[in-house]
Image (cartoon, rainbow, N blue to C red):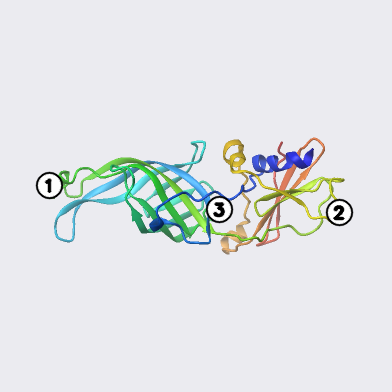
Amino acid sequence: MISRILPVLLAIGAAAQSAPIARPEVPDKIQAPAGEEVVLVLHAVGAQIYTCAPGAEGKYAWTLKAPQAELRDAQGTEVGRHFAGPTWKYKDGSEVTGKATAKVDAPAPDAIPWLLVHVVSHAGDGMLSRATSIQRIHTKGGQPAAAQECSAARQNAETSSSYEADYYFYAPGKGSGVASSTGSAGPGSGEVLGGVASANPAGDTQANSPPQRIRVSERVMQGLLKSRVYPEYPSLALAGHRQGVVVLRVNVDREVMFQTRSRSAATGYLYPRPSMR
């Protein structure tokens, strides 16, 4: 029984990664590079800010100054911000700045283009630390005001245009390798292995048999997730910009109470997490 419940509990309580998120259908011109996989999808709601300025030939036109938008998860909760850079900042403190490398017209004539963005810099540690490409798709609105509203008389004037869009964040695929902790786990324990939940309660399988691996669906993660657990990185590792794999170990008792501990491979330190149901 515990072996069947454990994967769901891992996804809901300990935020184990779900099965890979499917790539969206987009024109070839803005396809993400081969070998990259979607690691995060966020919906932006905000505005595109434009400034009236002279162009190279002295003709005045609206020029994009910056986006200002909330980034929301599948439940509509604000989890980050999108602002000048262009920069995307997630709630765990990680952020990326990018540069557009390709674009295509949006299906709706009044919507800003769909983009492929190459990440040029990172800051902080967290969900966006590995991101290398971003797609902006499913855009609504965001186009500047009419061209005739920008002239020498209105130089440096600003206008705001409401928009929405979906942002798909990509990172290099992890292949078939999985992370596992060292040492033996006692009966009734399970581990998160590279986004796959495994369980081996006492008596379910032979001691030397491989753990059972059960994929946690995207629906469980996006629809039933109660809280997301973020590893607690030691200050010494952050200050030294040290990186490493963090392994979550979950111990389950007969009442399906469990605790998680995160171990940073950068330092080997262990950080207890509170009990969860």
Residue 239's disc is none
| Figure quadrant of residue 204 | top right
Q: Nearer the viewer, residue 232 or 259?
A: 259
- Of all residues, the one furthest to the left in this rendering is 153
The percent coordinates of residue 5 (x first, y second) are 74, 39
- Which callout, 2 or 1, points to the residue nearer the camera? 2
* Circle 2 residue: 207
Q: Callout 3 environment at 10 Å: few (<14), some (14 to 19), or many (20+)? A: some
The percent coordinates of residue 174 (x first, y second) are 60, 60
Residue 126's disc is 3
Q: Quadrant of the N terminus?
A: top right
Residue 153's disc is 1
Q: Is residue 130 visible?
A: no
Between the C-alphas of marks 3 and 1, the distance is: 46 Å
Between the C-alphas of marks 2 and 3, the distance is: 35 Å
- Look at the numbered disc 3 and give the secondary structure of its residue: loop
The percent coordinates of residue 233 (x first, y second) are 62, 55
Could you tell which of marks 2 and 1 lies nearer the N-terminus? 1
